Structure formats: structure tokens, C-alpha cells
Image: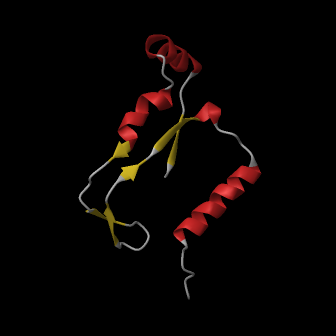
Amino acid sequence: MPYVAVFSSPSAQAKLLDKNGLTPAELLRPWGEVNNLNNYSVKTCDKNMPYKLKNFRVNFIDSHRMVNDPKISARIVEKIIKTNNPKLSSK
């Protein structure tokens, strides 16, 4: 699942918490999940290949809650590579 960092000013964060009890990321989360796309076809950017979407989900995270730890970043990249199993080009 892809993650999207939500950047907001401290005053916007305070106002949202005061009025709704939500952070900016929590406010956006209901629009981060789309179900039943009936295999909607889109094309990839890199190879212009068709890719069918069944369900789509994005997780919104408040940027101030993100940790800048190189070890964590390396593990995320490692997981993405293992999950997608990209093939090496013979060029």
C-alpha cells in the first residue's frame, strides 16, 4: 500500500483537532480507499503496459509523525523491491 505524507501548518493542525478531533491525514483517509474498480485498466509510466486495478488504497500519514531513520528507509526500499520483484534489464 502506498503512503502519502500530509504536510500542514501547526495552526491548521490545531484548528482541525479543535473543530473535528482529526489530524489532516485522518481527514483525508476516507478518500484513500477505492473498492470495486471492475479491473479498470491504466497504463504504467515506465513501459506503457496495461495494468488492471481491482482495489486501490493509499494510506495518509501526517508528516510530523514520520521518522527520518536511514535504517527504516532502507528496510522500506528492500520490502518494495522484494514485493515487486523487478526484472533486470539486459541493456
- Taking the image as shown, residue 72 lies to the left or right of residue 3, namely right
Looking at the image, which residue is at 59% across and 35% down? 63
- 1 to 78, vertically: above or below: above
Image position, residue 8 (x, y; %): 53, 27
Q: Tell me where residue 56 appears, x and y as whole percent.
A: 37, 52
Image location (x, y in percent) of residue 13: 53, 20
Q: Quadrant of residue 39?
A: bottom left
Q: How are the colours assigned in the image?
A: secondary structure
Quadrant of the image occupied by residue 62: top right
Residue drawn where x is 52% and y is 46% of the image: 3
Quadrant (top left, top right, bottom left, bottom right) of the C terminus: bottom right
Measured along the vertical axis of the image, is residue 21 above or below residue 48? above
Whether residue 74 sits left or right of residue 43 in the image: it is right
| Image: 81 above or below 59 | below
- In the rendered image, the residue lying farthest to the left is 38
Residue at 57 percent across and 81 percent down: it is 88
Q: Name the residue at the top extreme.
A: 18
The count of marks equals: 0
The x and y percentages for residue 18 are: 50, 11
